[in-house]
C-alpha cells in the first residue's frame, strides 16, 4: 500500500514538472501575441504585408537621417566602390588559362564603363544602387538583354542589363502556377517573371520574361519565400517610435527655449491692483524695477533638454543594428570605446556583412557574370580555344570590401607569418584585400625594372647591401 502511494506521489510530481516546463504555452496575457502570428506559408504573409513593409521603408529612407545613414553604410560595406570579378577559366588539363582570363577581364573593363540600358551608370555605381534598393525594398530584378535593334549597347558589345524595381512585378497577380507575379513549376522553381508594360502601373498588361533573362535578388527569412522583404522589416516600428520621440523632444526644447515668466502676487493685495495688466519685454540683463509690494517674479521651469534621452536612444540604436546585421556604430555614428571593444564590434558585425555579401554575389553578380561571359562568346568578342574547359567558363572570384584593420602592423605580420609557413599563398593575401594578384605582381615588376634603370634600391629588394638602400 505504501509503495502504491509513493508511486502515485512520484507520478504527480512528474506531471507537475512537465506542466511547469511548458508553462509558456498556457493561455495568458503574455503569450497572447502568438495569436497574431501569421499562419500559412511565407507567400501568404508577404501577400498581406509585403507592400506595406516596402512603402514604410521607402518613407523612412526619404525622411529619416538614421535610415539613410544605415542603408548607405551597409551598401558601402557590401559593395564599396564595386565588386571586382576575376575570371578563373581553366584548360582541360586543369591549369589556369591566363591569356583567356586576361582577355575576358580586359573586355569587361571596357564594357563596365556604361553597361546599363540608360547609359547613366557604370557597373560599380549600378551595383551600389542595386544593393541599396535590395536592402530597402527587399528585392530588385535585373533583366539581361542581348541584341535588340532599338537599344544602344556599348559600341560593338551587343549586351546590356536593366535594373527593375519590385513594384513593376505585380505581387497581386496569382493564378494557376503564377505566384505573386512569378510563374513556377511543381517544385517551386521560377520559370518566368511577369512585369507591367506600363511603368505607371495604370494598365494590367504584362510582359512575360523567361527565367534565363532575369536575375531576382531578394532578401528572405523563410523557406520557399517567393518575394523579398525589406531588411528593415523587424525594426520599422522602433524607427518610427524613435522618430516620434525625437520630434517631440525637439518641440519641447523649442518651447523651453522660449523662456517665460509670471508675476506672483500676495493674495492680500487689493482687487484693483491685482487686475492691473502689465507686460514686459525680455532682454539680456533686464531688471524688474516696478514690482509692487507683495509681488514677485516666477520663472516657468523646464526639464529640457532631457538628460536621459541619449542613453535611451543609444539602447534603441543597438537594437536597430542587431536587427539589420549592422552595428551600433553604423547606426549611431558613435565610436567612443576602448580598442578591444571597437575591434570586437567590428569583427562581430562583419560576420553579418560577409553573409550579405554572399547573398548579393549569388543573386546579382554571379548571374550578371554568366550573362556577360555567354554573350561575349556568342557575339564573337571572345573566341574560345580548343583546349579550354567549357565547364569553367563561368568560374570567377569576386572581390568585395574587406574588414578594415584597426592595427595594420599586427595584421600584416600575421599574414607574413602565414605565407612564410606555407599556410597561405601570396595571391590569396593580395586577393583578400580586394586586389588582383596579376596586376599587383605586374606593378611590382615594372617598379623594380624602373628602379634598376634609375639606380635605386629599396629595403624590399634582396641581394643589395644596406648602404645602397634608400
Image: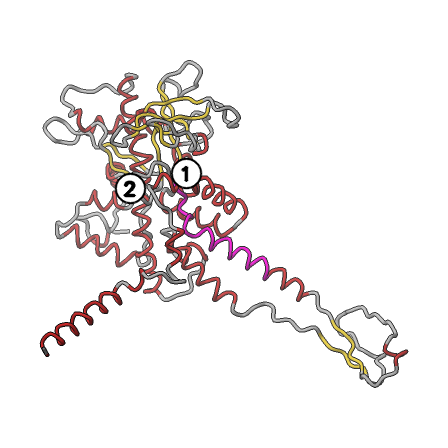
| Residue 434 is at least partly visible in this image | yes
Q: On the rendered structure, is 261 left or right of 350?
A: right
**In the image, residue 298 above or below residue 63:** below
Query: Which residue is denoted by mark 2 in the rendering?
Result: 223
Q: How is the image coloured?
A: secondary structure
Which residue is at a point 26% across and 20% down the rendered structure image? Answer: 377
Image x and y of residue 302, in percent: 64, 71
Q: Position of residue 72 (x, y in %)?
A: 44, 46
Q: Residue at x 33, y 23 (%)?
A: 210
239 part of magenta stretch: yes
Range of residues picked out in magenta: 229-249
Element under disc 1: helix
* Residue 103 shown in magenta: no
| Label 2–label 1 contact, CB within 8 A | no
Q: Residue at x 23, y 49 (%)?
A: 460
Q: Which residue is mark 1?
A: 47
Residue 102 % position (x, y): 25, 29
The mark nearer the N terminus, 2 or 1, is 1
The residue closer to the viewer here, 285 or 201, is 201
Amino acid at each position: 500500500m505504501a509503495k502504491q502511494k509513493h508511486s502515485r506521489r512520484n507520478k504527480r510530481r512528474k506531471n507537475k514538472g512537465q506542466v511547469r516546463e511548458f508553462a509558456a504555452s498556457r493561455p495568458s496575457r503574455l503569450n497572447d501575441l502568438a495569436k497574431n502570428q501569421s499562419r500559412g506559408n511565407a507567400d501568404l504573409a508577404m501577400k498581406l504585408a509585403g507592400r506595406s513593409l516596402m512603402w514604410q521603408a521607402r518613407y523612412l529612407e526619404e525622411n529619416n537621417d538614421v535610415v539613410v545613414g544605415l542603408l548607405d553604410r551597409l551598401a558601402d560595406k557590401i559593395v564599396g566602390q564595386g565588386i571586382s570579378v576575376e575570371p578563373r577559366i581553366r584548360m582541360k588539363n586543369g591549369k589556369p588559362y591566363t591569356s583567356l582570363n586576361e582577355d575576358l577581364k580586359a573586355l569587361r573593363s571596357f564594357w563596365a564603363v556604361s553597361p546599363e540600358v540608360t547609359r547613366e551608370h557604370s557597373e560599380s555605381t549600378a551595383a551600389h544602387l542595386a544593393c541599396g534598393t535590395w536592402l530597402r525594398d527587399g528585392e530588385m530584378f535585373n533583366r539581361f538583354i542581348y541584341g535588340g535593334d532599338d537599344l544602344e549597347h556599348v559600341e560593338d558589345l551587343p549586351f546590356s542589363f536593366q535594373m527593375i524595381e519590385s513594384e513593376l512585378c505585380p505581387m497581386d497577380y496569382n493564378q494557376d502556377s503564377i505566384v505573386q507575379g512569378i510563374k513556377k513549376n511543381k517544385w517551386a522553381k521560377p520559370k518566368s517573371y511577369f512585369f507591367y508594360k506600363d511603368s505607371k502601373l495604370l494598365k494590367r498588361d504584362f510582359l512575360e520574361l523567361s527565367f534565363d533573362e532575369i536575375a531576382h535578388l531578394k532578401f528572405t527569412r523563410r523557406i520557399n519565400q517567393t518575394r523579398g522583404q525589406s531588411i528593415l522589416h523587424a525594426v520599422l516600428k522602433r524607427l518610427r517610435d524613435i522618430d516620434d520621440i525625437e520630434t517631440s523632444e525637439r518641440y519641447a526644447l523649442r518651447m523651453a527655449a522660449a523662456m517665460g515668466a509670471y508675476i506672483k502676487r500676495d493674495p492680500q493685495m487689493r482687487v484693483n491692483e491685482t487686475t492691473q495688466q502689465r507686460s514686459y519685454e525680455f532682454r539680456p540683463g533686464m531688471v524688474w524695477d516696478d514690482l509692487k509690494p507683495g509681488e514677485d517674479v516666477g520663472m516657468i521651469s523646464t526639464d529640457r533638454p532631457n538628460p536621459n534621452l541619449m542613453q535611451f536612444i543609444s539602447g534603441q540604436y543597438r537594437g536597430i543594428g542587431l536587427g539589420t546585421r549592422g552595428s551600433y556604430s553604423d547606426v549611431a555614428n558613435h565610436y567612443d570605446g576602448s580598442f578591444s571593444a571597437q575591434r570586437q564590434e567590428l569583427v562581430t558585425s562583419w560576420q553579418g556583412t560577409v553573409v550579405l555579401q554572399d547573398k548579393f554575389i549569388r543573386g546579382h553578380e554571379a548571374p550578371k557574370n554568366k550573362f556577360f561571359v555567354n554573350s561575349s562568346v556568342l557575339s564573337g568578342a571572345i573566341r574560345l580555344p580548343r583546349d579550354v574547359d567549357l565547364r569553367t567558363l563561368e568560374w570567377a572570384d569576386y572581390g568585395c570590401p574587406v574588414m578594415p584593420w584597426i592595427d595594420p602592423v599586427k595584421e600584416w605580420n600575421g599574414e607574413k607569418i602565414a605565407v612564410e609557413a606555407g599556410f597561405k599563398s601570396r595571391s590569396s593575401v593580395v586577393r583578400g584585400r580586394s586586389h588582383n594578384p596579376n596586376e599587383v605582381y605586374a606593378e611590382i615588376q615594372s617598379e623594380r625594372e624602373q628602379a634598376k634603370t634609375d639606380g635605386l634600391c629599396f629595403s624590399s629588394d634582396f641581394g643589395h647591401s644596406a648602404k645602397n638602400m634608400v
